[in-house]
Amino acid sequence: MAVSDYLQRNRERSLEELNDWLRIPSISAKSEHREDTARAAEWLAGRMREVGLQTVDVVATAGNPVVVGEWRGAEGAPTLLVYGHYDVQPPEPLDEWNSPPFEPVVKDGRIYARGSVDDKGQVYLHLKAVEAHLAENGSLPVNVVFLVEGEEEVGSPNLGAFLQEHVERLRCDAVMISDTTMFAPGLPSITVGLRGLAYMEVRVQGPSIDLHSGAYGGAVVNPALALARILSQLHDEQGRIAIPGFYDRVRELTAEQRAAIAALPFEEEGLREEVGAPALGGEAGFGSVERIWARPTLDVNGLLSGYTGEGAKTVLPARAMAKVSMRLVPDQDYKEIERIFIEHVKSLAPEGVTVEVEALHGGQPWFAEPEGKVFDAAKRALARAYGRDPVMIREGGSIPIVQSFQQTLNAPVVLIGFGLPGENAHAPNEWMSVENFHVGAEAIAALYEELR
Ligand code: BES
Ligand code: ZN
């Protein structure tokens, strides 16, 4: 098939282009990288124009720009909106990378670089599918609109408003997203559920300045201990979250869903090895996959207080701080969870310190039945590219805008991930499988044909 041949012939060039994009440190969390994120947006827009999209715009927002690229030459055919992000997570800790995060290295069939799998490689393979069709046939079997943002990793604070403002331009029959993982190598996967998120910061203030722990210790409440005590009361002995009302809206797994999970090729020991911890742990009564896909969590993402440098310093710190995030499942509402978290944590504050709690960002959980024309086409396309039928999975991560897509555009959202377990997203030595980059492009090219 010509399109597939084109992709094969151009594999090396495609990979080199992706590496160019990966060299741009588009870190959305850090303001010093604002120009880099803008450069990453322009880079993509440039490639979209070269490939032959008809209209390409880099649209300014209150934050990083959104890249919109359209090809609408298939009259009467369905329109696909491809969503992804060009921003990446901060690369720290730098000394744990085997090669610099923004100097991509291709080794052992993997592309090592920050943003390789999350999400530049997964966005770029969609553009490769478009390129192959346009190069070989001069047209696409469907209409395609790309919407690639630069703030996904910081909670998409400006994309909701952008959607509202451009509803007409973004009107589509389905939203396609590749920003997730496959359940196992070679096993194509469609993600039908994501967890939501409520991200909080807890600040505990004791004395007005750091104190000599000998001169004052014992007579002044220690904020680090006060915070530790608060945090330790947020779970019970069963690993359940001990915030009143937290589970009120949690949709329980059905017996059928539990059976489907049990039928997947998964070993607890394999997961333990992947993460390198001495043992796994979590809410009693559930397996790891159930815990990650369908149960809410409360995690400490960061903890700071007192002296943490070399050697010893006898100090009673003035303050302590924790970053706490909760992953949410249907039908929890992040606004409500933020509210009960704040109320409960404040109620746990011991005398002698003040406790402030702030909500940093959030997103709703999402779950969809994989039914309809686009899901069926996606299943056939994945089966063609990978030689086996895809599995339906859920994932524990979050893509905050997914729920808004469904509501604002009233279109089904189909998540086809080309990441793999252990790919180190958000961690040192992030990688994407070279094979999945290429086969992913084949799958998307096939999807356009299946939808015709
Ligand atoms: N690609 C991930 C989402 C993801 C992670 C899907 C793991 C499936 C499994 C995305 O880029 C991401 O990291 N999202 C953030 C969202 C947050 C910053 C609002 C997340 O899940 O932490
Ligand atoms: Zn991410």
Image: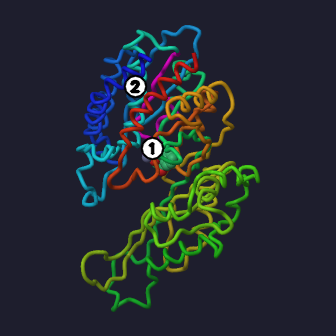
Q: Nearer the viewer, residue 105 or 208?
A: 105
Local packing at callout 2 (Cα closer than 10 Å; few below 14, some 14-19, many 20+) is many
Residue drawn at (39%, 16%) of the image: 53
Left or right: 232 as drawn, with respect to 243: left
Image location (x, y in percent) of residue 55? 40, 15
Residue marked by disc 2? 127
Going by the numbered disc 2, the residue's amino acid type is Leu
Viewer can see residue 154:
no
Left or right: 90 as drawn, with respect to 262: left
Mark 2 or mark 1, whichever is nearer to me: 1
Residue drawn at (34%, 18%) of the image: 51
Q: Is residue 295 magenta?
A: no
Residue marked by disc 1? 419
Left or right: 204 as drawn, with respect to 451: left
Q: Say which quarter of the image contains residue 173.
A: top right
Q: Work out which residue is located at the far right of the displayed protein and give it.
A: 255
Viewer can see residue 204:
yes
Image location (x, y in percent) of residue 439? 43, 33
- Whether ligand 1 has any atom under 8 Å from the Cβ at mark 1 is answered as yes
Image location (x, y in percent) of residue 355? 51, 69
Q: Quadrant of the C terminus?
A: top right
Q: Nearer the viewer, residue 444 or 359?
A: 444
Residue drawn at (47%, 46%) of the image: 185
Q: Nearer the viewer, residue 123 or 296?
A: 123
